[in-house]
Image (tube, rainbow, N blue to C red):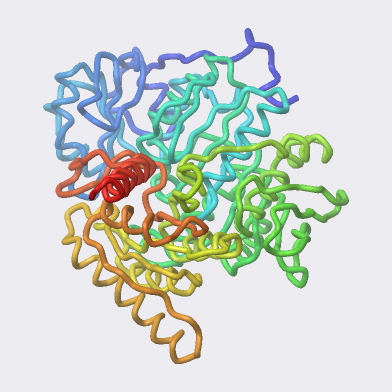
């Protein structure tokens, strides 16, 4: 019996613990030793600004300094202990006034400590984790919707939203830090949820945020150029993703093997003792399951050891057929019969900012808002829209500031190679960088791809640089025509534009901007018709 099926009165409850017991649990040394076991700890916190009475403050090395610098503030706020490394312990000395637990790597033990203090909530939920460069959000939403149709009560941890007890709220990050994550899982358990579908980011895996969670099934969608500003190189990026596919975090996995990263991961997970279902889109690829069906169609078959499943992707594009297939195989791994899995995935699914349509009515182009911000994601999305657009396809090309700069030129090239008729180079979240410098890098990729297409005798798009995204949206609506499509890439579900120092935000929602631009265009057209 899955732990999610246990009677409610057998579920564990959040439980405070003696600091000495926590130290023993994680193999740490308690300084000074206390025969009484030390103070009782109610929860763990990483941010001294969140500390309160009865808390354990976790002081670890960060990108800009060591958390021990804030330990005194946490203690003044009521923290009854500090968990840190040997460097932090030396800096604290004996003057902090509370016991200190010393471990080799605080980040590596924070998840298990937070889980223990919340009563190990993941044990009471069916846990499904999805990682990969692209497709995490859509796959997670497909799974959440399917589980509801199967009569389950799933929570959701995703980039756009967090769902607890059926209530939706905006997410701050894709995968929260370990203490927040464990508190979130405890809220799900206490609200009566019996499952959790979670996007698991590479940052979260590298920073041990999901340690203390064991997934019933984990999935890998793909690996492509992204987050190298953080990971440094593709090898480190792969290694972070691969952490999810170890016996400590899961026993079963679904891995898409269309790229080299997926094939390497399948083999690595198998060597680690994880049971793997592999999935491929090409018949010649060695895999246990294959997507079968004419490209460009939303309906397809999933063929494998259990026979064939007739499926339909709720969103357009080959990548969304793959996401649907991944969700189906994860359900099969949970023991859902094939016919029930197919039926559960058959209904519509709305994914915020993922191929999200903005309805403007007759006489207007089809408008799609999509979070695609990697070259591969943009290319896949635009290709799907090109195949469905009888008229002009207008796409935006942009890149965020203070993030991996090496993907800017490839993103511009992908916009051109999609077959778009118009490529608009504009801004999304410049952050602390000069927006003009970011656009210049994207434009280099655009111009290089235009030159390559021209020399090959292929059609080339009109290229327009517009410094403000608001101006680009209005231009796109007027340029596409009634039978065209506008694809706004990069921001998706986001409710703001990040400009200036960290925390600098101005409200900006692509969907709302589309509606406002359409209204302004309509007013201008009406005014021009009434002029004598």
Q: Where is residue 262? Give x, y as percent.
A: 61, 62
Evaluate whether residue 104 shows in this view: no
Name the residue at the front extreme: 532
Q: In the figure, is residue 20 to the left or right of 139?
A: left
Name the foreground residue: 309 vs 203. 309
Name the residue at the right extreme: 307
- Please give the name of the residue rendered at 25% of the width and 58% of the height, measured from the top-left corner: 401
Name the foreground residue: 361 vs 384. 361
Q: In the figure, is residue 88 to the left or right of 297?
A: left
- Please give the name of the residue rendered at 59% of the width and 50% of the height, measured from the top-left corner: 245
Name the foreground residue: 24 vs 148. 148
- Please give the name of the residue rendered at 60% of the width and 38% of the height, measured from the top-left corner: 349
Evaluate whether residue 412 shows in this view: yes
Q: Where is residue 185? Give x, y as percent.
A: 49, 25
**Quarter of the figure with residue 258:** bottom right
In the displayed structure, 191 sits above or below 437; it is above
User: How many numbered tags mark residues here?
Assistant: 0
**Quarter of the figure with residue 184:** top left
**Quarter of the figure with residue 443:** bottom left
Q: In the figure, is residue 246 to the left or right of 28?
A: right
């Amino acid at each position: 019996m899955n732990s999610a099926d246990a009677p409610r009165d057998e579920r564990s409850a959040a439980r405070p613990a003696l600091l000495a017991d926590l130290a023993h649990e994680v193999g740490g040394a308690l300084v000074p030793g206390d025969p009484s076991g030390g103070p009782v700890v109610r929860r763990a916190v990483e941010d001294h600004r969140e500390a309160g009475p009865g808390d354990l403050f976790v002081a670890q090395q960060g990108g800009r300094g060591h958390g021990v610098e804030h330990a005194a503030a946490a203690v003044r706020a009521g923290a009854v202990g500090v968990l840190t490394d040997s460097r932090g312990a030396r800096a604290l000395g004996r003057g902090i006034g509370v016991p200190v637990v010393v471990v080799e790597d605080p980040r590596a033990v924070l998840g298990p400590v937070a889980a223990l203090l919340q009563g190990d909530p993941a044990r009471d939920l069916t846990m499904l984790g999805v990682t990969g460069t692209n497709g995490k959000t859509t796959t997670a939403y497909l799974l959440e919707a399917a589980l509801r149709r199967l009569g389950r009560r799933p929570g959701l941890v995703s980039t756009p939203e967090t769902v607890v007890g059926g209530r939706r709220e905006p997410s701050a990050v894709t995968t929260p830090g370990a203490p927040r994550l464990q508190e979130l899982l405890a809220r799900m358990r206490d609200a009566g949820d019996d499952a959790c579908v979670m996007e698991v980011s590479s940052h979260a895996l590298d920073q041990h945020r999901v340690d203390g969670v064991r997934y019933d099934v984990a999935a890998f969608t793909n690996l492509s150029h992204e987050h190298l500003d953080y990971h440094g190189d593709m090898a480190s990026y792969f290694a972070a993703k691969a952490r999810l596919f170890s016996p400590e975090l899961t026993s079963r996995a679904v891995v898409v093997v269309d790229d080299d990263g997926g094939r390497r991961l399948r083999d690595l997970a198998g060597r680690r003792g994880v049971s793997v279902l592999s999935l491929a889109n090409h018949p010649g690829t060695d895999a246990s399951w294959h997507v079968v069906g004419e490209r460009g169609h939303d309906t397809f078959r999933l063929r494998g050891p259990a026979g064939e499943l007739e499926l339909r992707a709720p969103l357009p594009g080959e990548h969304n057929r793959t996401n649907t297939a991944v969700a189906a195989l994860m359900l099969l791994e949970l023991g859902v019969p094939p016919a029930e899995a197919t039926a559960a995935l058959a209904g519509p699914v709305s994914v915020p900012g993922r191929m999200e349509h903005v309805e403007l009515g007759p006489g207007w182009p089809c408008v799609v808002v999509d979070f695609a911000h990697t070259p591969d994601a943009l290319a896949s999305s635009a290709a799907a829209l090109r195949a469905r657009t009888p008229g002009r396809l207008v796409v935006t090309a942009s890149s965020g500031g203070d993030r991996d700069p090496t993907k800017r030129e490839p993103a511009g090239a992908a916009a051109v190679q999609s077959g778009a008729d118009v490529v608009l180079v504009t801004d999304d979240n410049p952050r602390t960088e000069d927006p003009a410098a970011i656009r210049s890098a994207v434009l280099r990729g655009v111009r290089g791809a235009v030159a390559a297409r021209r020399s090959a005798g292929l059609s080339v798009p009109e290229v327009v640089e517009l410094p403000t995204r608001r101006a680009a949206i209005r231009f796109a609506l007027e340029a596409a025509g009634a039978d065209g499509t506008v694809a706004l890439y990069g921001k998706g579900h986001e409710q703001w534009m990040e400009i200036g120092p960290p925390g600098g935000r101005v409200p900006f929602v692509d969907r709302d901007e589309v509606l406002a631009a359409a209204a302004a265009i309509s007013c201008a057209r009406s005014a021009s018709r009434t002029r004598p």
